[in-house]
Amino acid sequence: MPELPEVAYQKKYADATILHKKIVAVETGDKKIYQSPKSDFEKHLKNNEFESTTRLGKYLFLKLKKNGVLVMHFGMTGKLDFYQHDETPKYTKLKLIFEDDSKLAFTCPRKFAKLYLAESVDAFQESHNLGVDALAISEKQFLDICDGRSGTIKGLLMNQSLIAGIGNMYADEVLFQTKIHPKNKVNNLSQKQLKSIFDKIGDVLEVVKEARIEGKRVPESYLTRLRKEGEGADCPRNNGKIEQTKVSGRTTYFCPVCQGEV
């Protein structure tokens, strides 16, 4: 599922391709991903243009020149595809045709993406109960969020109403880099451990974001590289073997040697 780094890549892609171009035609697809009537999207987008983009957590906001914001959540497999040929990409759910005959497709094979219309980023954040962006949160805000929490640390990191942008994969990575077991309870962690987690949130997300934008692989020291191998993969730090468990209902990878016992 696209998390903060992947959405940051989609933002850069949009910035480079679709800003300040008049939309002359709108084609809507599967109604399941539209969170307002499709006719509303057609009305708001046609003869309009995108002025700027903003990212908050896993959401991409495209500000419209005339009114409001188009909001994109990429689900499991959503992405943007800017093109100039005539053949519409497979799995296109929204297609915009610009005045210069270039096009933008929002594609999603697995149909879990969502498209919204909103008045503003702030209004959407409030109405959808989104927390502070994971790359904007301060240490004090993070420690305040952790104070008195009795759930697992991984569950807290993935809670979008507390911290927006961290999903399953990068919650695992942050905890792997800090050598903390994902099932540890937040209120059992020391202040030093919590500060270490805060530091690694920024480090991990920035490293992966730049890797995604530049088309590079993440460092060899990252657990993320081993997810396809799954359970039994060699830990990049020691002679441990990566294990799999469930935390907050999500498949979770960790090294029992590095990250210890709960």
Image: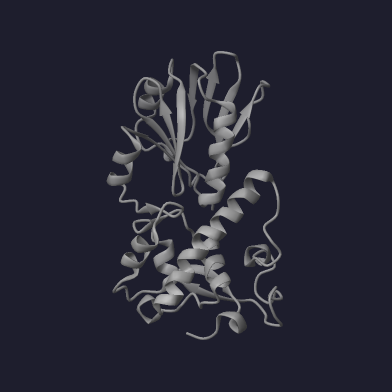
Above-or-below relation of 99 to 70: above
Camera-side residue of 134 and 58: 134
Q: Going 57% across and 70% down the picture, which residue do you hit?
A: 177
Residue 4 image offset from top left, x and y in percent:
51, 50
Q: Going 55% across and 25% down the picture, which residue do you hit?
A: 18
Q: Is residue 14 left or right of residue 194?
A: right
Q: Is residue 147 left or right of residue 135?
A: left
In which quadrant of the rendered view does residue 54 lie?
top left
Residue 148 image offset from top left, x and y in percent:
29, 74
Q: Is residue 32 visible?
A: yes
Numbered disc total: 0
Residue 129 image offset from top left, x and y in percent:
30, 51
Above-or-below relation of 175 to 209: below
Q: Is residue 120 left or right of residue 181?
A: left
Residue 246 image offset from top left, x and y in percent:
50, 73
Q: Going 51% across and 58% down the picture, which residue do you hit?
A: 202
Q: Is residue 248 visible?
A: no
Q: Residue furthest bottom?
A: 261
Above-or-below relation of 66 to 134: above
Q: Is residue 66 left or right of residue 1?
A: left
Q: How is the image coloured?
A: one colour
Q: Going 40% across and 21% down the picture, which residue do you hit?
A: 65
Camera-side residue of 197 and 24: 197
Above-or-below relation of 163 to 27: below
